[in-house]
Amino acid sequence: MNHDQLRELLDLDLDLEALAGAPGPGALPAVEPVESLLAPAERARLHEHLAGCADCRQERESLRRVHAQLAATVVPPREGFSGEVMRALVPAPWEARAVAVWRWPFAMLLALGGLAAILLGGAAADLEPRAGSFDAFVALARLLESAALAGAGLLGASWQGLGSGLAQWLAASKTHLAGAGLLLLALNLLFLRLLRPSSRNAEARKSR
């Protein structure tokens, strides 16, 4: 290995010192061991050459000063910069939504399911006033099953009868009417809540 080749290895040796956290100007914080930039035999030969070559030692000091100047020009990012970048990124369409996004819609859906069950139970009770709550749901399920088996005509008639019973139930009390209005309002809020992330992503794309 000639003199010029040893000089080429000098910069690699300084890089290895910086990665190892060696003391001196331009040294980087110590990191986990990395694959050596120089083979042990090459590094030993380089250090042996430096011991007897004043020119190469001078060049090494010059390179160390360059490393120190480069390290001094590194500008650390401001606090919170990484979080700002991550929040500005538009999620991919196939990216699963976080659990927190679905928490409130799921809770609202459960509440709406309970309210709908109460409303349908009241309507079914008006269709069969003497039947209990459980019997009313069973009768309603059988009615829908019979309608599906009988065909589209009977299905339409069954829904018409169910709608008539529901209309009578709503007209019987202002409380029933208020409950139905609350159900419709909650459904609209749930729909808007589910569309909200998509709207935010669309605005982020337009701003770009």
Image (cartoon, rainbow, N blue to C red):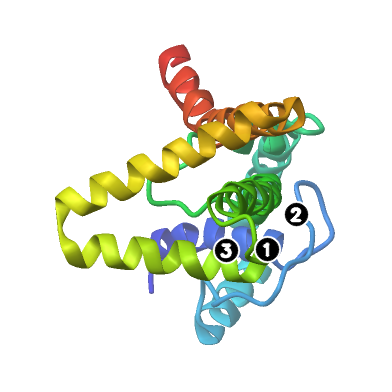
> How many C-alpha atoms fall within 10 Å of the one at disc 3: few (<14), some, or many (≥20)?
many
| Left or right of 20 in this view: 102 | left
Q: Position of residue 127 (x, y in %)?
A: 53, 51
Q: How many numbered circles does the render carry?
A: 3
Taking 38 as reference, is 41 above or below it? below
The residue to which callout 2 is attached is 28
Distance in Å between CA atoms under marks 3 and 2: 77 Å
Q: Position of residue 29 (x, y in %)?
A: 79, 58
Distance in Å between CA atoms under marks 3 and 1: 77 Å
Q: Who comes first in sequence, dot 1 or dot 2?
A: 1
Snapshot quadrant of residue 128: bottom right
| Left or right of 154 in this view: 171 | right
Nearer the camera: disc 3 or disc 2 = 3
Amino acid under disc 2: Leu
Q: Position of residue 23 (x, y in %)?
A: 84, 60
Amino acid under disc 3: Ala
The residue to which callout 3 is attached is 136
Q: Who comes first in sequence, dot 3 or dot 1?
A: 1
Question: In the image, what residue occupies the spot 34% across and 45% down?
Answer: 159
Could you say which is closer to the camera, residue 168 or residue 203?
A: 168
> How many C-alpha atoms fall within 10 Å of the one at disc 1: few (<14), some, or many (≥20)?
some
Question: In the image, what residue occupies the spot 64% across and 49% down?
Answer: 122
Question: In the image, what residue occupies the spot 51% across and 70% down?
Answer: 138
